[in-house]
Amino acid sequence: MARVLSLLCPQSFLGLVGLRKTVFCRMSLDSRGRGVFAAAVGAVQPDAVVRRSIERKENSILIDGHSFKLRNNLYLVGFGKAVLGMAAEAERIMGDHLVKGVISVPQGIQDTLRQHGKEQLLLKDNSRIRVMEGAKHNLPDADSQKAAECIRQLANELTEEDLLLVLISGGGSALLPAPIPPITLQEKQDVSRRLAAAGATIQELNTVRRALSTLKGGGLAHCAHPAQVVSLILSDVIGDPLDVIASGPTVKSEIWHEEVFSILDRYKLSTSLPSSVKEVLGRTTPRWEESKEESDRVENVLNVVIGSNRIALKCAGRRARELGFRPVVLSPGVCGDVKSVSHLYGLLARFACSLEEPSPELATEILKLGPEVGVQSWDLCRTLQALAEGRTEGWGATCLLAGGEPTVELTGKGRGGRNQELALRVGLELRGVGLPPNGPVFLSGGTDGQDGPTEAAGAVTDRGLWDEAQAQGLDIDGSLTNNDSFTFFSRLSGGQHLLLPGLTGTNVMDVHMLIIPSIPITIR
């Protein structure tokens, strides 16, 4: 007679590991998933990432293995949504050597942080750093252009004895607009807006922006020469490409006007450009004349990514293990249409929860989806192997972690965001997947705490979502068609499925979590 062993918290094992493990195992999968998400966000808090990256030793600092002397020669600039907290921590560590600084941050960010109890991310009243707010609605404006000019002036005044600390985070491009004269800010914005509307990629947009900017594409580092430049970067871009984050103001980029015109031709914009843009792109001389000394001293610029989705997932995996899960990281680069991404997670859940050997066709279908959602075949094969071992060897509950930034096709006018829509779609995909009581649990949350124009970061769902919605008279299909996922989750069970961490003060894209319960195994 067969006997089924549930490997979820066996009492003999609990006796060995003590009460703490018992408490964790009694927590619901939903609660533990939220705890893992909190750990991911905590790992990339602006003050925390700066604190980890700078080691102070008397009158010197160590950053990424490089040592820099401090002799009242430190200057600081920054731009981005998370830069205020980064600057506050940098000043706490090195303030006694800080001469002055300028940071460009979103309009209203200081009041917002105060309202959310994030005083640790604010500068002190006697700070030597000037805070300039701008870029309302994340669009470059006169205020952010004024801040960019102040940053440029500070950089231009530096000498070879000085150290410039540059703090960069997501949103930095809109907060550092510096069009090459005679291009106006409005003209530069119009070109970018028309390119985006025509379907240009982020790489193409950045190529054009750099060609029209004084500070992007290494321009800020050039202004600061001959000073030592150290950039600490909180990345909100898949793969952490240094030249793409905030359009790479401290990363030297070659500007080929032929390439820029090729992009503009591709989207049929080259004939309708403002005369100022045509003038700048028609110049045969480079944006700036680089001295031999400057070209020989590439080591004078150090760029370090100190916070990213990959780092968030690593810390989330650590917390998952503490909470009794076996962590498996799929990829930090999930992208593509939310429909394809939700289907991938649905297929992975079916593969992991199968009580029998999954069909080869299922694995093949998963691998075919890889290119659509930005996941390499190697990562999918590695993940499938880990899920198969967990199922056959009884390793207990598994926490599959991933990150990235899927996209949503807007077909309606409802309230929602990509994380809530992804969670809703995955909930549908999980319908019919086995394992009591509600099978796998899925969580998707934005690390900035705000998913679209809503106060939620995302949502948590499981295979019981469809039945729960039907019992409460809620229309899932209609909510998806109208992109109204926030309204749906707000009404479902009194909003219990919503993920509501509040404003976090950071942003390294999204965190996805598929929690697979312990699979019962049969011993004959």
Image (cartoon, grey):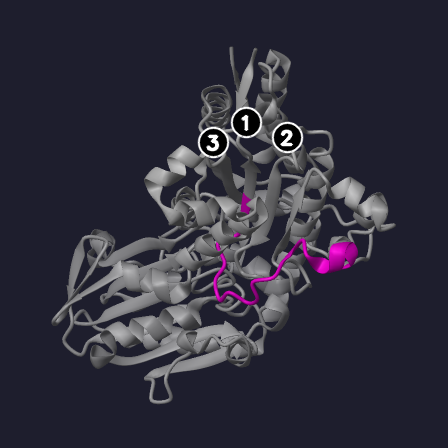
Q: Which residue is mark 2?
A: 435
Q: Quadrant of residue 102?
A: bottom left
Report the front residue among 345 and 258: 345
What amino acid is labelled 1 in the image?
A: Ile
The residue lying toward the viewer, choosing from 348 and 147, is 348
- Find disc 3 in the rendering and name its residue: 396
Magenta part of the chain: 491-512
Query: If you read the primary sequence from the N terminus, does the residue marked by circle 1 or circle 3 appear first?
Result: 3
The quadrant of the rendering that contains the N terminus is top right
Per the image, label 2 sits on a secondary structure element best described as loop
Q: Which residue is mark 1?
A: 519
**Of the image marks 3 and 2, the number of the one nearer the N terminus:** 3
Say which amino acid is labelled 3.
Gly
Going by the picture, which residue comes out furthest to the front?
1
**Whole-percent x and y of residue 474?**
85, 50
Q: CA distance from mark 1 to mark 3?
A: 7 Å
Residue 351 visible: yes
Going by the image, does 497 lie left or right of 70? right
**Which percent across, then down, holds residue 245?**
45, 54
Q: Is residue 12 magenta?
A: no
**Three-letter amino acid code at the position of disc 2:** Leu
Q: Would you say 100 lies left or right of 432 here? A: left
